[in-house]
Image (cartoon, helix red, strand yellow):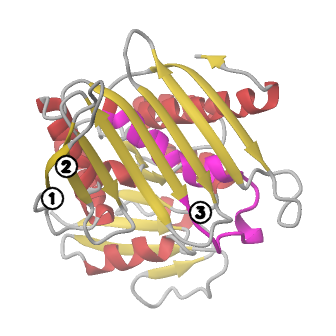
Amino acid sequence: MKYNIALIGCGRWGKNHRKLLEDREDINLSYICDTAMKEDRDGEPIITNNYHEALEDKLVDAVVIATQIGLHYEIGKDSLNAGKHVFVEKPMTDNSKDAMDLIKIAKRNKKQLMVGHVFMYNPAVQYLKQKIDEGYLGKVLYMDARRLSSGILRERIRHYDVLWELGIHDLSMFLYLSGKKPESINASGDSLSNLSESLDDISTLNLKFNKEPINCSLTIGWAYPKVVKELVVVGEKGTAIFDDASDNKLTFYDFVLKKGGEGVTNSYSPNLPNISPLENQLNHFLHCIKNDVKPLSDGENGLEIIKLLEDADKSKKEGKEVFI
């Protein structure tokens, strides 16, 4: 089966979706909808400034929404009500109320709603999840993530702070890898006065899980001289490091916390599937449409992460731990 898909939003990240969709033999990229592009209704795909043109086309099976965050809800709602399956970039919406509404609309129209938490489709992260579930690391005790970079301070994206823009990746991995729901969140952040006035450019966050030894910490910022994208998972039997900025994405260590000493005896890096997270994510979306199964990063998952971001905002504002 060949799927007819419309891409809504073809900016900085949307261009990656366009390339992937155009390269697929099982997809016909029917429309590109972007207000910044010159319209062309004679070519293939049709390029239009009005996404409703794509929604009115009964041959379109699904849409990929890669616009600014503030537009996700309205376009997602219109698309679902038009009978289209929806893939929407993260975060699904900019508030939990709108996210809950999209979930209801998707259920009412019996259409797929999938959120682009792309790190859940990274082969290294999926392999790490498999090993955690198999007990290879033993009971997970701690997860620590660092996501630091420079050069992203563009006015275009300064409607949301660093947690909403980038930290959402690590929150999705924390929930995915732990398979648990956190009990509390404690966050702090700061705006660098010469870069922005009100939005945090650097932030730290801690999650605690009820009746579990797992603690998760995150350090994130976009005013750092080099790129760091690292997640460390510490278990009773070993440690794993996912380093997305390295060619060697995943390494396991036989590192065990012991009183009076420490030791790393062995390490190994697995052979991982040669597929990009974005393509793996698209494969999953098509699989869910074809087989009518719930996506890994469905609307409920997207809502849970948005609620965590809202709780993080509350924690930063009140200056204290927030219980979920």
Per the image, the residue denoted by label 1 is 269
| Quadrant placement of the N terminus | bottom left
> Magenta stretch?
148-177
User: Badge 1: how crowded within 10 Å, few (<14), some, or many (20+)?
Assistant: some
Question: Which of marks 2 and 3 precedes in the sequence?
Answer: 3
134 relative to 18, above or below: above
Residues 75 and 231: in front is 231
10 Å crowding of disc 3: few (<14), some (14-19), many (20+): many
Judged from this view, the residue extending furthest toward the top is: 211
**Distance of label 3 from label 2 (alpha carbons):** 37 Å
Q: Please, what is the three-letter code of the amino acid marked with disc 2? A: Phe
Front residue (pair 147, 267) = 267
Q: Which residue is mark 3?
A: 67
Q: Residue at x 55, y 72 (%)?
A: 226
The earlier-in-sequence mark between 1 and 3 is 3
Proximity of marks 1 and 2: CB atoms separated by less than 8 Å: yes
